[in-house]
Amino acid sequence: MREAKSIDIFLLTLLGLIWGSSFFNIKIATYSYEPFTLALIRVIFASIPLYLLCKFKNIRIKAFSNNWRPYALIGLCNIAIPFTLIAIGTSEINSYLAAMLMSTTPMSGSVLAHFFTKNEKITLFKSIGILVGFSGVVFLFFDKLIINENNYMYALITILGSTFYSIGGILTLKLKKEGNENVTTSTTLWSIIFLLPLSILFEAPWQLNPSIESTLALLYLGVVATGLAWLIRFRILTVNGLVFQTQVAYLIPIFGVIFGYFLMNEIITWRVLISLVIIILGIYIVKKNNKGMKK
């Protein structure tokens, strides 16, 4: 893995920008689309460039091979469930708040990795980072202007979505030898299989009359924030390694706050800014002491 050059830093920043912008687009998409349908259309849009990439590179897609079960489980836990939960949560909270709550993924991931992996145990300093990061999240709940009795459950649902990303990440480790393109495409295809009947049964998507604004936001979420972002992520992983790629976790909540304030006119309080600093500090401490991510 090479030392980061200007192009690498640019791509990492672009990835943070894309993922940070996904939350206000989710918010806009929820104006017209219900959660299962939103998640379904998003992964359909995302699956197209991923499928074409595999065909172009002549990569076998193993979604429906004899070893289909782990792909199905990851598609459920890493895509279908979190995409749906985040859509539900973001529909009732500020988009930048969703971005900040989602930044708990590295911390919840460290807790889960301690119990379900052999090489990523919680150390003293990592536990300090986890406590610091989560204290920043707890601090948000004392800001009644941002989180109150009307939406606190939606904030918790968003955190639950973040936790499922961590669960999906742990499960994905079992398929790390199967190739990133194959795993991502296969799990995306399985997420479509899970989401399609749920959308049809509970939301009757054929009755929707979505706005152009919501549809464009959803198109962006699928093609750019999921499909293209994954391709950028894969390029960074192969050139610069996992440690460099995970630094995007610092950028997502920052861009989320910027987009929420300037594009969505969402109110930002002094407690939000303090929480943002505390959460980023917690992520830094956790990642600094994450020995299992040095490759």
Image (spheres, grey):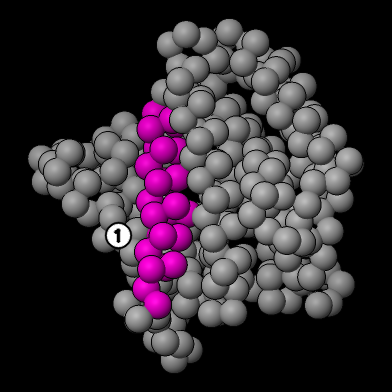
Examine the rendering and report whether any part of residue 42 can be seen. yes
Would you say residue 80 sits in the magenta stretch? yes
Image spot of residue 10 (x, y percent): 73, 61
The quadrant the C terminus occupies is bottom right
Q: Seen from this angle, which residue lies furthest bottom?
A: 58
Q: Residue at x 73, y 25 (%)?
A: 136
Secondary structure mostly seen in the magenta stretch: helix
The image quadrant of residue 251 is top right
Q: Residue at x 30, y 59 (%)?
A: 192
Camera-side residue of 90 and 12: 90
User: In the picture provided, is 105 more to the left or to the right than 286?
Assistant: left
Number of marks in picture: 1
Camera-side residue of 101 and 112: 112
Q: Residue at x 14, y 43 (%)?
A: 201
Examine the rendering and report whether any part of residue 13 can be seen. no
Residue at the disc numbered 1: 192
* Mark 1 residue element: helix
Image spot of residue 214 (x, y percent): 32, 40
Would you say residue 294 sits in the magenta stretch? no
Q: Taking 113 as reference, is 230 above or below it?
A: below
Q: Which residues are magenta?
A: 67-91
Camera-side residue of 50 and 186: 186
Q: Residue at x 69, y 43 (%)?
A: 111
User: In the picture provided, is 73 more to the left or to the right than 102?
Assistant: left
Tell me the crowding category of disc 1: few under 14, some 14 to 19, or many 20 or more residues within 10 angstroms, Cα based: many
Q: Amino acid at mark 1?
A: Ile
The quadrant the N terminus occupies is bottom right
Image spot of residue 148 (x, y percent): 51, 10
Image spot of residue 7 (x, y percent): 75, 69
Q: Taking 189 as reference, is 165 above or below it?
A: above
